[in-house]
Amino acid sequence: MPGGPASAAGRPDLVVGPSGGAIARWFVFGPARLHYTLARSVIISKAAAGEYLAQLFPGYADLAHRAVRWRTGEAERFTATDLVAAGDSVNVVADDAWRRIGN
């Protein structure tokens, strides 16, 4: 389909321009790095944060690995659905952090 794979709604999933990788990267790395720091009192690299997200929440593994590859300069494309998933990962990571430290 033009623009990328079909979205969950059955419509074409639009490929996001160069800013898509930057947005996905921020959503994938930032919260995962903070989560790791809260859990272990150690600051990890952005690439390690992507791997941490993939291990902690396997449903986001593909997105996390693609964000890591994009950060190293590999040609990765992100769709609107990817950005929604990246935003959802922020909530999942934050919810898990709240469960671990308490409200």
Image (cartoon, rainbow, N blue to C red):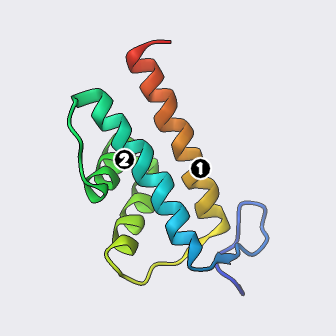
Give the label on residue 35, or none: none
Which is nearer the N-term, disc 2 or disc 1?
Answer: 2
Please tell me which residue is depicted at 62% across the width and 79% down the height of the picture.
17
Amino acid at dot 1? Gly
Q: Position of residue 35 (x, y in %)?
A: 36, 35
Q: Residue at x 39, y 47 (%)?
A: 58
Residue labelled with disc 2: 53
| Residue 54, placed above or below residue 38 | below
Residue at horizontal 34%, vertical 55%?
50
Q: In this view of the protein, which residue sits in the foreground, 17 or 1?
A: 17
Is 95 situated above or below 84? above
Give the farthest residue toward the top: 103
Image quadrant assignment for residue 23: bottom right
- Kindly indicate the quadrant of the structure image that contains residue 61: bottom left
For residue 63, above or below residue 91: below
Q: Position of residue 96 (x, y in %)?
A: 45, 28
**Residue of label 1:** 87
> Which image quarter holds the N terminus?
bottom right
Secondary structure type for disc 2 = helix
- CB within 8 Å, label 2 to label 1: no
Residue 65 coordinates in the image, percent (x, y) = 36, 63
